[in-house]
Image (cartoon, rainbow, N blue to C red):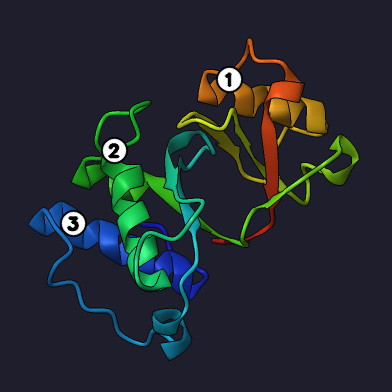
Amino acid sequence: MYQPKSVYTDIALKALIHYLEFGDTRNLVFDNIPEELYQTQRACFVSLHLDDGELRGCIGTIDPQEENLVKEITRNAVSAAINDSRFHALEPEELEDITISVDVLTKATEITALDELDPRIFGIVVTDGSFRRGVLLPGLEGIDTAEKQIEIAKCKAGLNRTELEDLTIYRFTSNRYH
């Protein structure tokens, strides 16, 4: 089974195990979590991958939805396992074959020019100002230009036919934990 290398992925794994056993995370108790994670409110993404690196689920938030980072990671870990519409819900026996990463995000800020982007450093949010928005994390394999990053984010948002000048782009950084 996956062995977390950080407190962030340890939270995610424990949340998944508890949810798959009990069907919720209400009575989940964590041991040895630094107090600062209970006092920090940040957005995050939780990604699940198969042992061969193939994506198995990824859900996150751009703005924090929970009162602290522990609850944010817990929420997004469970959502990545059961609510990512690209995959069927994670089965308990699949826990043996997954790895987990947690990206803790900074607050997204609007850019004014494409040269403010670097897909190795910055993730992006692309929106048309309505409810449609596409998000792409930084440092993803095979995405080495801002144009490619924007193209993918536009597709995710269903905005592939929208002209760049009709979109607002935000950038953020993240720390990725395994």
Disc 3 packing (10 Å; few <14; some 14–19; many ≥20): many
Disc 2 packing (10 Å; few <14; some 14–19; many ≥20): some
Camera-nearest label, 3 or 1: 1
Which numbered tag is attached to residue 163? none
Q: Secondary structure at mark 3?
A: helix
Camera-nearest label, 2 or 3: 2
Seen from the viewer's position, the closer of residues 169 and 146 is 169
Tell me, yes or no, whether the two marked residues, 2 and 1, touch with CB atoms within 8 Å: no
| Residue holding disc 1 | 155
Distance (Cα) linking label 2 and label 3: 13 Å
What residue appears at the point 46 percent right and 53 percent down from the top-left corner? 100
Which numbered tag is attached to residue 83? 2
**Residue 61 shown left or right of residue 107 in the figure:** left
Distance (Cα) linking label 2 and label 1: 20 Å
* Residue 86 position within the rendered picture, expressed as x and y whole percent measured from the top left: 37, 26
Q: Amino acid at mark 3?
A: Tyr
Lower sequence index among marks 2 and 3: 3
Seen from the viewer's position, the closer of residues 130 and 97 is 130
**Residue 122 shown left or right of residue 69 in the figure:** right
Q: Secondary structure at mark 2?
A: loop
Q: Amino acid at mark 1?
A: Cys
**Residue 116 shown left or right of residue 15 in the figure:** right
What residue appears at the point 59 percent right and 27 percent down from the top-left corner? 128
Q: Quadrant of residue 152?
A: top right
* Residue 103 position within the rendered picture, expressed as x and y whole percent measured from the top left: 55, 57
* Residue 38 position within the rendered picture, expressed as x and y whole percent measured from the top left: 39, 81
| Residue holding disc 3 | 19
Disc 1 packing (10 Å; few <14; some 14–19; many ≥20): some
* Residue 2 position within the rendered picture, expressed as x and y whole percent measured from the top left: 41, 58
Taking 123 as reference, is 132 above or below it? above
Lower sequence index among marks 3 and 1: 3
